[in-house]
Amino acid sequence: MGLQARVQREFKFITALIRTLRRVGSISAQSSNLICDDLEAAVDSWRERRAITFEGRTLSYGEMDAIANRYAHWAIEHGVRRGQTVALYMANCAEYLSIWYGLSKVGVATALINNNLAGEQLAHCLNISGAAHVICDAQGAPQVEALRGGLARPAVVWTLGEAAGGLRDLAKALRSCSALRPDRSVRNGLLAKETALYIYTSGTTGPPKAAKVTHVRAQLYMRGFAAATNAHQNDRVYVTLPLYHATGGLCAMGAALLTGGSVVLKTKFSASQFWGDVGAEACTMFVYIGELCRYLLNQPEQPGEKTHALRMAFGNGLRPEVWEAVKTRFAIPEILEFYGSTEGNVSMFNFDGKTGAIGRVPPYIRSRFNVRLVRFDVETEAPVRGTDGLCQATAPGEVGECIGQIRAGDARAEYSGYADKAASEKKILRDVFAKGDAWFATGDLMRQDDEGYFYFVDRVGDTFRWKGENVSTSEVAEQLSVLPEVKEATVYGVRVGDLDGRAGMASLVVGPAFDIAGFAAEVDARLAPYARPIFVRLQPEIETTGTFKYRKMDLVADGFDPARIRQPLYVRDGAKGYVKVTKATFDKIQAGDMRL
């Protein structure tokens, strides 16, 4: 990179960083200014402007606030006290943000529950929320009613749909509630360190955990993205992500609603409708996560995919191998990738758009950030410690676990944890670089180059050891995803009899012309012997969470057992390439009679 290009890069980075830090600089855990105060200030500035458009219906800022006020008065009238929790189990809708915004005005926390859950998983999320009241829509009401008797504590269930059986009619109750703001005094004494929301982890590797989102954290998300995206009042943000998740429900909403802009909201993502919606609504930004962009690339060319008003796509999880394809094919001027987690204290942005990087901390301002990488043992799934008992920092290019120092009094570095105190404690590393220090363990493996760019490698537990080498499932999946006729790929390790380590297995969604022999040849050309998948499973689709994360837990449980898998299943048999796994083959592998 030439001198002029370096200067331009640094100017862009520093300008965006300063803009973002200024926007979040006044946030404090001890402040009485809450997330609802931020939103009320936005309403007062742009009351008549459009705020949220959903399925042909548009709410102005003033109408959004009026709905929120009704929910605030509803909570007061029905004895929901400050510090208590209400569970919200609904699909995306125009009123979604107003519900938790209104409850926050009277000091009530809202547990945002994945509306795709049912049965035991739903009961688990309701139980750990501690909510005495549940708000649901017509689709969710039967699910809640079916398990209400089995909940750990009785809950009053309110529905915006038909109030049959023991359900209460929320729409009717709201009609008698005032649309005027409750007096500010009802939250006197409430500080920003208190919990505003509970947002649940995806549950890809176990039961979901309820992350505590304080007013501070909600403000960091909403203000931070308003600044990082450099949003303005003419921006329209297209949101197809679920609002029960922080990226769609806080980051995207903040970018629009704290700047006078507006949100174009959909019930859920549709690749076939995406570009038609973006064009019809004159959207200027969209938010992505996980595999959303790959789904768009897998679609045949769509009208409007280049002739739009988009200036930016922002989000996280955009895989490096599709990054440039997304920018080029869809003519998107700028991609803003970020890194963060709902419960964590590490966040960073790739402000200057370096392909594949999830963020950057240049060496010259490293001390201003709490993020570091430490050496990690993938077999013990623990950081490597020296003879002094302390952790060891990685060198440039070396893979390590990303950790964030917990600093009391620094809003950006505080750690709120989960509703479960034991689960919160498990994520804290102590005595890392000095006796008595404390760091949040993100569970993400990364590497950092000498210019400060961070690159995601894998999740702890996903990287596995095979034939004495560490195998990154994410990096292998990246290589497989660009092979002919491979539309989606997820990679994981499976146990094989008494063999040490785990063998690589790939689950693929493929096109009609997929050829397993050709696939084997491509794999041999691209991957080291230890990284080549031993097993391959073909599927019509791979199950994902509502935020497009692959549910590997079920795939790992199935392993390579043909008794559990009805789709095509193959094993690598040396020079023969991939051969089908039969019952006889399975038994031979398990007995150790087949060399892998």
Image (cartoon, rainbow, N blue to C red):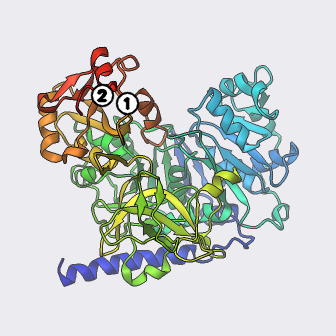
* Element at label 2: loop
Does the rendering let one see residue 466?
yes
* Element at label 1: loop
The tag earlier along the polypeptide, 1 or 2, is: 1
**Residue, disc 2:** 592
- Count up the numbered dots: 2
Q: Quadrant of the N terminus?
A: bottom left
Q: Amino acid at mark 2?
A: Gly
Q: Amino acid at mark 1?
A: Gly
Q: Nearer the viewer, residue 249 or 494?
A: 494
For the point 76% across and 42% down, which residue is it? 131
Q: Disc 1 vs disc 2: Cβ atoms closer than 8 Å?
A: yes
**Distance in Å between CA atoms under marks 1 and 2:** 7 Å
Q: Quadrant of residue 254?
A: bottom right
Q: Which label belongs to residue 497?
A: 1
In this image, 474 relative to 339: left or right? left
For the point 53% across and 78% down, which residue is it? 22
